[in-house]
Amino acid sequence: MARIAPSFLAADIWNCAEQVASIEAVGCEFLHLDIMDGCFVPNISFGPDYVKMLRPHSKMFFDVHLMVSEPAYLFNDFAAAGADLITVHVEACRHIHRSLQQIKDLGLKAGVALNPATPLAMVEEIINNADLILLMSVNPGFCGQSFIAATLDKCCRLRGIAPDLVIEVDGGINAGNAADIVAAGADLLVAGSAVFAAADCAASYKKISDAAANSKNKSNKLACWKR
């Protein structure tokens, strides 16, 4: 079954410890960590020290998404901070194959992200080198955006190209569209505001997770992705 990775970017800074603990207590296995540099995207979030502070308090799989120009300088720091997966944007890397290998050499899983307007052709040559492909379903940089419906077709086409690949979809995901996204081939859904902006984070997480589980797609590619 598909998994939900709540995006820490949307958490309430005053209550984030309680929020993260609450979703983990009801079975959440993945935490998505959006790293923004104010250059590749028009926003700045947090760095490896923040992830390092989080790591002792959670057994969740840390899914680090680098929305950063030329991100290789950060790989060692995020590995040391406790990342389990590092995903980089194909649009931000001059040598994407080298970047993936550098991440894997650190003992981590390596992913590649594509912005909504970036064609799948940009990753066809490196699909076999990636553990995961992330499809942005909003333009990156901010929480609370609406899901771009064309992502469903893009996800279906990617699944046709790579039947065994782990596919992650990020942006605008909620209980109302989760089942359709999983049916299109997604394995991991990133939900930010839909979880952390809710009055009850744990209940909202469960609602989205239950909706995803109702999809006809029962693939379980992430069963062995553990901390």
Image (spheres, grey):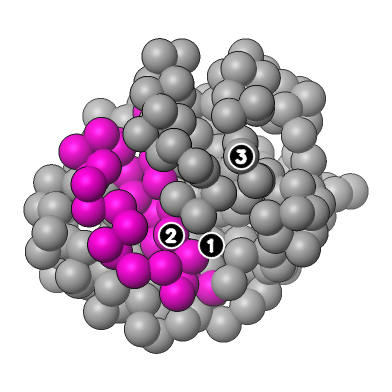
Which residue is depicted at the point 21% across and 63% down? 158
**Mark 3 belongs to which amino acid?**
Glu
Q: Earlier in the sequence, mark 2 or mark 1?
A: 2
Q: Amino acid at mark 1?
A: Ala
Residue 55 vertical placement versus 80 (above, below): below
220 or 205: nearer the viewer = 220
Q: Residue at x 43, y 59 (%)?
A: 114
91, above or below 224, in the image = below
Query: Are the residues flagged by discs 2 and 3 in contact, CB closer than 8 Å?
Result: no
| Magenta residue check for 117 | yes
Q: Which residue is mark 1?
A: 191
Q: Is residue 42 left or right of residue 112?
A: right
Nearer to the camera, 91 or 76: 91
Q: Which residues are magenta?
A: 109-138
Percent across and percent down for residue 192 are 61, 61
In the picture, measured across the screen, residue 42 lies left or right of residue 204, that is: right
The residue carrying mark 2 is 114
Residue 102 falls in which quadrant of the image? top left
- For mark 3, what is the residue? 70
Label 2, label 1: how many angstroms apart (C-alpha)?
17 Å
Q: CA distance from mark 3 to mark 1?
A: 26 Å
First in sequence, mark 3 or 1: give its number.
Answer: 3
- Crowding at mark 3 (Cα within 10 Å: few <14, some 14-19, many 20+): some
